[in-house]
Image (tube, rainbow, N blue to C red):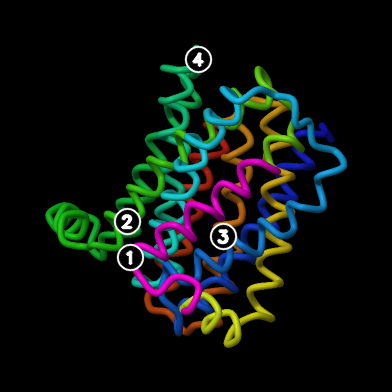
Amino acid sequence: MQQWLIFALFTALLTGIVAIIDKKILLKEHAMEFSAIFSLTNAVLALFLMPFVNFNIGIKNIILIYIISWFSTLGFLFATKAIRHMELSSAIPLMNLNPVLIAVLGIIFLGEFLTVKQWSGIVLVLFGGYILETRHLTNYKEFFYNLRKSKAIKYIFLSMLFYSFSSIADRFIVTKVTNVTTYLFFVLLFIAFNFFLMSSILYGGIKDIKKSFRKHWKLIAITGVLTFGYRLSQIYAVSLANVGLVINIKRLSVLFAVFFGGELFHENNLTRKIIATIVMLMGTVLIAI
């Protein structure tokens, strides 16, 4: 098995577990507070990378990484908002639309090319999204109504947009600017700073963060470690392979989260959602090969 594939599969497993734990916390917690605590936990873990970090990358590259960190910051915030306000088994599969955006952005910014199979995969992903959001397949008006009226779906599309740019930027930085460890160190610190800044301006800042941490510190610590692991694994994977391939393999986490998360939280229409997820995953496989 190729090294990039091992990293990508490991990323998928950890991502699925994190999604389920996140939903459990978000049943009782606000998205901003959760995101701030979560990112601060990751920043603390990032300090262990310091012996391996190259601090001589230049102020321009540090500023570039900070700008890129906002893509991940906003992507995570909107994804968290969607998961909080939507059933996990509905929110997570819709994020399978992200490979479509990444594939298109890869063509535009990285000069990558798609085969007929990959374009077929894009069609399957879109069809799976249609199944997910439409109880009756012939009622296409329901699909567009749900897209237009659901605030959570809008959060998902915003999250995918920011994460797509983030993935492209990740690949550029670790192949053209610096190594994986250095990039991960700086970007995690910057993401934590961004969330602390937003929390302080828009909410109660450190007071709310302390209050939330006392209530959920065990689960947050677990998700922090797992997220640190999957981010490190994902960045290594995208440094070795096409960014679209890596992200599509990562999407296998969706089936895990939909099945086990849907059962755990007793969510509705789980069979239809699993079928839609499988169709979308078939599409992501075609995009990846």
The secondary element bearing badge 2 is classed as helix
- Which class describes the residues within 10 Å of circle 4: few (<14), some (14-19), or many (20+)? few
Counting residues from the start of the chain, the first of labels 3 and 2 encountered is 2
- Which class describes the residues within 10 Å of circle 1: few (<14), some (14-19), or many (20+)? few
The dominant secondary structure in magenta is helix
Counting residues from the start of the chain, the first of labels 4 and 3 encountered is 4
- Which class describes the residues within 10 Å of circle 3: few (<14), some (14-19), or many (20+)? many
Give the label on residue 113, or none: 4
Q: Looking at the image, do the residues carrying marks 4 and 2 touch, with CB atoms under 8 Å apart?
A: no
Distance, label 3 to label 2, CA atoms, is 21 Å
| Residue identifier under label 3 | 255
| Residue identifier under label 1 | 202
Give the label on residue 155, or none: 2
Outermost residue on the bottom side: it is 215
| Residues shaded magenta | 185-207
Left or right of 166, for residue 18: right
Residue at the (35%, 62%) spot, across then down: 201
The secondary element bearing badge 1 is classed as helix
